[in-house]
Image (tube, helix red, strand yellow):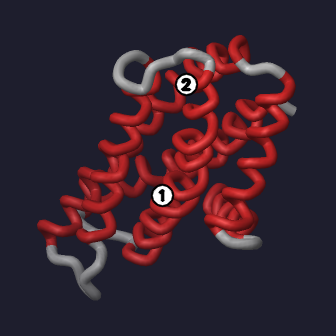
Amino acid sequence: MKATDILKREHQAILLAVAAAEEEAAYIADTGKIHLQKVREMADFFRNFVDRCHHAKEEKHLFAVMHEHGIPFENGPLAVMLHEHEQGRECVRAIANAVAPREPDEQARRKAGDNLALYARLLREHINKEDHVLYPMADQLLNTGDQDRLRKAFDRVESEELGEGVHDKYHAWIKKLAER
């Protein structure tokens, strides 16, 4: 399996959370209410699975190997991806801050909903670019040794940086979220 296949599989899980975020954003906009625990769980998933795991695999490993093959960080596709990762982090911080109070007020609920919608749109567009532009580019650049090195690095991100079993915990959460 190619390293990009692992990332694409994670994208499918992330898109399930994106769909739930879109639904929650619409619910907040329509009712002014919020499913507080659900949104807190989403913020946790976005912060840990999407950023600390998935984006870490890309930024620390895939992008670095692509850079070794001559793709610059300063401009072009890697610069765009890095910028979008940072935009996503800002949205997730805003969501988490909005739902931090025990009972968020109307303004905080609205802020959570707006940022859920913004983050969902950003992720959908971002994933599309990666799946259809960046990853095919990587697959053309990377040799078998690069692929092996990346798969091992991805395993280390899951076990050492995220923590043993945490990756599986988030996949279980996604499965449960999709069944709701």
Query: Which amino acid type corresponds to the residue marked 2 in the rendered image?
Result: His
Q: On the image, which quarter does residue 57 sit in?
A: top right
Asked where in the image residue 70 lies, by quadrant, the reply is top right
Quickly name the residue at label 2: 67
In the picture of the structure, the residue carrying the numbered disc 1 is: 46
Residue at coordinates 44% horizontally, 77% vertically from top-left? Answer: 37
- Mark 2 or 1: in front is 2
Q: x, y (%) of residue 169?
A: 70, 69
Secondary element at tag 1: helix
Horizontal side of 141 relative to 102 (left or right) equals right
- Residue 133 is left or right of residue 143, and the answer is left
Amino acid type indicated by mark 1: Phe
Residue 11: give x, y in percent of width and height: 62, 40
State the residue in front, 90 or 125: 90
In the rendering, at what x and y percent does residue 136 appear?
66, 16
In the rendered image, residue 148, in percent from the top left (x then y), is placed at 84, 36
In the displayed structure, 69 sits above or below 111; it is: above
Q: Is residue 180 visible?
A: no
